[in-house]
Structures are given as C-alpha cells and as structure tokens.
Image (spheres, helix red, strand yellow):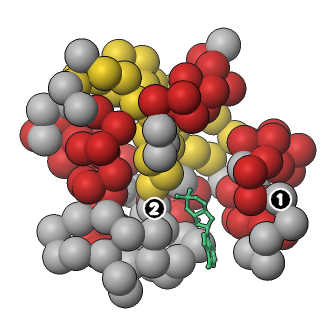
Amino acid sequence: MEKTFLMIKPDAVERNLIGEILKRVEEDGFKIIDLKMDELTRYRAEVFYEVHRGKPFFKKLVEYMSSGRVVAVMLKRANAVKRLRVLAGATDPKEAKKGTIRYDLALDGRRNSVHASDSARNAKFESKFFFG
Ligand code: CMP
C-alpha cells in the first residue's frame, strides 16, 4: 500500500466542504491514516511551496494559503499518489475533468480546494511537514 498526502485548502474549509471532500476520498478506496486542522503562517506556506518560489503566482499563493485554516490528511491505498491526483483533477478547474474534486468544487486556478502530492517523495516531505 502506498501513502500520499492531501491538503484541503482555505477556500474549501471556508465553504464547509471538508466532509464532501473526505467522502469522495474514502469512497475512492483511500484509508485515512492521520488528519488535522492547521493554520499556515506566511513563512510555513513559503516552506511548503518552496519549489514554486520565484514563479509569478508564488506571492499570491502564499497569501491565500495563509488566509484561513487548512486540513492536512495522510492517506493510503494502492497506487495512492496517482489515484489522488486523478481524483483531484487538473490544477485549474477550467481544465479539470467533470466529476473531479476541482471541476466540481474549486473556484479558480489558485483557490482550487485541494493539494495532492505529485510524487511519493513529496508525499513524505509534505506529511512530515504537518505531522512530524
Ligand atoms: P497545488 O496543486 O497546491 O500546487 C501549487 C499551487 O499553486 C496550485 O495548487 C495552485 O493553488 C497554485 N497555482 C498553480 N498554478 C497557478 C497559476 N497559474 N495561477 C494561480 N495559482 C496557481
């Protein structure tokens, strides 16, 4: 069984979508191993998204990610990293497939409701970031 990491972002927490997102994740066969609500400072958001530093959207991303509470979730299932990326859909909801979390729930390319790790290595880093 592979592990991966999901974060429910401030736009989704604010709109009471935690339950809806976790239901989709569980129905897709994921097991929740750990979960917590947290709030990112600007500094922690910068560290979490370090790989995007310097990109044109970085500053606004950090601002948005530290604007409200998030839910950090550790998950496992077979092929977890890939399956969660499919369930989340493309970064920009306008490009996401119907039925994906982002197509159905996201507001735009930044306020896109969830973050899903893009590799097993990043899943490890991101889980450690929140759960130690
Ligand atoms: P996420 O999958 O968490 O990874 C990086 C985040 O940066 C992404 O989701 C979006 O929230 C944001 N992002 C990526 N590309 C853009 C973009 N072109 N414009 C605005 N925000 C973006």
Split into 4 quadrants, where in the image is the N terminus?
top left
x, y percent for residue 124: 55, 23
Q: Residue at x 79, y 48 (%)?
A: 50
Query: Which of these two is toward me, 78 or 98?
Result: 78
Query: Which of these two is toward me, 39 or 24?
Result: 24
x, y percent for residue 117: 48, 42
For mark 2, give the secondary structure: loop
Q: Residue under circle 2? A: 113
Q: Quadrant of residue 121?
A: top right
x, y percent for residue 90: 38, 69
Task: Give the image quadrant in which the ligand numbered 1 is located.
Answer: bottom right
Q: Quadrant of residue 38?
A: top right
Q: Residue at x 22, y 75 (%)?
A: 97
Taking the image as shown, residue 44 lies to the left or right of residue 131, namely: right
**Cα separation between marks 2 and 1:** 20 Å
User: Disc 2 or disc 1, which is closer to the eye?
Assistant: 1
Q: Residue at x 74, y 59 (%)?
A: 52
Q: Is residue 82 visible?
A: yes
Q: Quadrant of residue 23?
A: top left
Query: Which of these two is toward me, 104 or 67?
Result: 104
Residue type at tag 1: Arg
x, y percent for residue 60: 77, 72
- From the Cβ of disc 1, is ligand 1 less than 8 Å away? no
Q: Local crowd at mark 1 within 10 Å, few (<14), some, or many (≥20)? A: few
Q: Local crowd at mark 2 within 10 Å, few (<14), some, or many (≥20)? A: many
From what the image shows, is residue 98 above or below residue 27?
Answer: below
Q: Residue under circle 1? A: 53
Residue type at tag 2: Ser
Q: Residue at x 45, y 61 (%)?
A: 113
Q: Is residue 41 visible?
A: no
